[in-house]
Image (cartoon, helix red, strand yellow):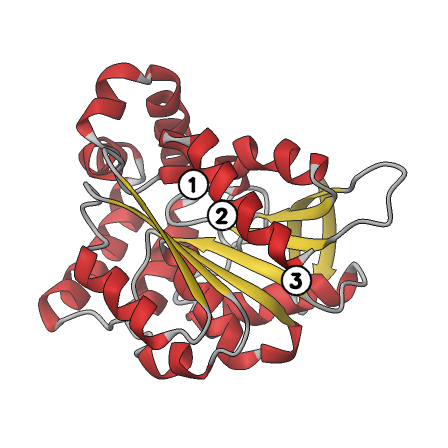
Amino acid sequence: MKIVKTREIHVAFDDVRPEGQTGAGTVLLVHGHPFDRSMWQPQIAPLVAAGWRVLVPDLRGYGASSVTTGKVTLDVFADDLAGLLDAVGVEAAVVCGLSMGGQIAMEFARRHARLLRALVLASTFPRIDPDDVRRHRLATADRLEREGMEAFAEEVLPKMLAAVTVDTMPAVVTHIRRMMRSTPPAGAAAALRGRAERPPYEPVLAEVAAPALVIAGDTDAFTTRADVDSMCSLLRDVRLVWMNGVGHMPNLERPNAFNIALLAFLAVLA
């Protein structure tokens, strides 16, 4: 783990590079809520073996990065990522985000298009929340600050994974539970409040000129097939990977299939 100061915070991140190679470029992996950079562990070695430098940060408020209390909007997360790229000397990156990380990646595309080499959107959606979902996010933020993460983690965990994953992959269940329980409640709450205010990202996707990859599972409790079709209809240069029997965490539930899809997409860029 490395730590760099960018803007007013300290960002913890992994920076893994291929040895003895110039490299094909940089992939920036952006985790979801309420997780940390360890959710990308199955992707790092295959990406590096294929010649890619891999940057994996803990977002502000998560993992070992600084916590900002109150509210953190997605533009703040996106600017933090741009600051990280600048701090480590990366001029452009493939930005890969899952769930909230995917929405941060869309905000990154809006604010920092010159830094975007390609876009990977996994288990995410561009639409804004309806009023009832927005109110639920705000109420959950208050609850996390009062009660902490443990009860919330147990309630949400079954929604994160396909039932078959829960039944057959106990190590994945344990990993996800650990990430959720160890997330700082104040950081998670601040992100929920900011996420409730996010803008619609459909106009952003319509303007993305970079190549894009969309990955989703058919039993995802949060991302629907309509969401996936919407993103694919808006993006100019897009590949879709639809994964059967997979929930909200395809990179952990089916890491080999996820890695094959991601590396095939990246091979075209390289």
Compared to residue 237, the image places residue 223 above or below, namely above
Q: What element carries label 2?
A: loop
Q: Mark 3 points at which residue?
A: 93
Q: Quadrant of residue 246?
A: top left
- Residue where numbered disc 1 is placed: 183
Expressed as whole percent of the image width and height from the top left, the position of residue 166 reads: 24, 22
Disc 2 crowd rating (10 Å Cα; few below 14, some 14-19, many 20+) is many
Rendering coords of residue 41 (x, y %): 55, 32
The residues bearing labels 1 and 3 have C-alpha atoms spaced at a distance of 26 Å
Label 1 crowd (10 A; few <14 / some 14-19 / many >=20): many
116 over 61 or under it: above or below: below
Picture residue at 66% right of the left edge, 46% below the top: 13
Q: Locate the N terminus and report the quarter of the image it occupies.
A: top right
Q: Which amino acid does label 2 sit on?
A: Tyr
**Which amino acid does the dot numbered 1 rest on?**
Thr
Give the answer, above or below, for where 25 lies relative to 252: below
Residue 193 image position (x, y, % from top left): 31, 65
Mark 1 falls on what kind of element? loop
**On the rendered image, what quadrant is the C terminus found in?**
bottom right
Separation of residues labelled 1 and 2 (CA atoms): 6 Å
* Figure quadrant of residue 201: bottom left
From the image, state whether disc 1 or disc 3 is nearer to you.
Answer: 3
Query: Where does label 2 land, which residue?
Result: 62
User: Of the residues under marks 1 and 3, which one precedes in the sequence?
Assistant: 3
